[in-house]
Image: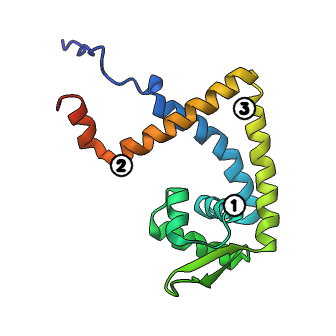
Amino acid sequence: MRQAATVPDDVLKLSAWLPYRLFLVAAQVARPLEGFYGEAFGLSQAGWRILAVIAERDSANAAEIGRACALDPFAVSRGIGQLVELGFAVRRSGKLDRRTAAVSITRSGRNAFNRIAALGNAIEARLLSRLTEAEQATLGSALTRLEAESARIDAGGWRALLDDRGGS
């Protein structure tokens, strides 16, 4: 009879791993939002994210949008195409470089964004209602620090992480 392998104490436990827990919260609240913008406006997830970026940053180019949305160039191109096809965005030649298209939100796109954002704000308000004001402030501060550190981790790559641990 085979015995179950013992698990060392330092093994990653997915259910307790902070990045996974953050992912679960994000995924669970994204589903109803995605259901709404998909059904009401025919938007993909990438299309929604790009719409949100251009609602905030008029005349953003594809590279800026990709960085802001964490999307690869192909997904950005497809998402911009979807927004243009739906009449939610227009693409114009860049001011300094004609090869760089600037993407701007249209009035129709702004109306769609505002309706989706209202639901997004309701989701956020419901989540935050579970926290005290002090907890909300702590969470905001902690997320700012985690965002900065996660950017450093991403920039350094996995080899740097192993080097930091002594190559183990």
Q: Is residue 131 visible?
A: no
SS at mark 2?
A: helix
How far separated are the C-alphas under marks 3 and 2? Answer: 30 Å
How far separated are the C-alphas under marks 3 and 1? Answer: 23 Å
Q: Residues within 10 Å of mark 1 (few under 14, many from 20)?
A: few
Asked whether the residues under the numbered discs 1 and 2 touch, taking CB atoms below 8 Å apart as contact, a structural biologist would say: no
| Residue 160 drawn above or below residue 60 | above
Number of the label disc, if any, that sits on residue 127: 3
Q: Amino acid at mark 1?
A: Glu
Instruction: Tell me which numbered mark, 3 or 1, is placed earlier along the sequence.
Output: 1
Q: Amino acid at mark 2?
A: Ala
Q: Which residue is mark 2?
A: 155
**x, y (%) of residue 7?**
27, 16
**x, y (%) of residue 163?**
21, 35
| Residue 2 drawn above or below residue 122 | above
Quarter of the image that includes the N terminus: top left
Q: Which residue is mark 1?
A: 56
Q: Amino acid at mark 3?
A: Leu
Asked whether the residues under the numbered discs 3 and 2 touch, taking CB atoms below 8 Å apart as contact, a structural biologist would say: no
Asked whether the residues under the numbered discs 3 and 1 touch, taking CB atoms below 8 Å apart as contact, a structural biologist would say: no
**x, y (%) of residue 128?**
73, 30
Instruction: Tell me which numbered mark, 3 or 2, is placed earlier along the sequence.
Output: 3
The residue at 30%/46% (across/down) is: 157
Observer-side mark, 3 or 1, equals: 1
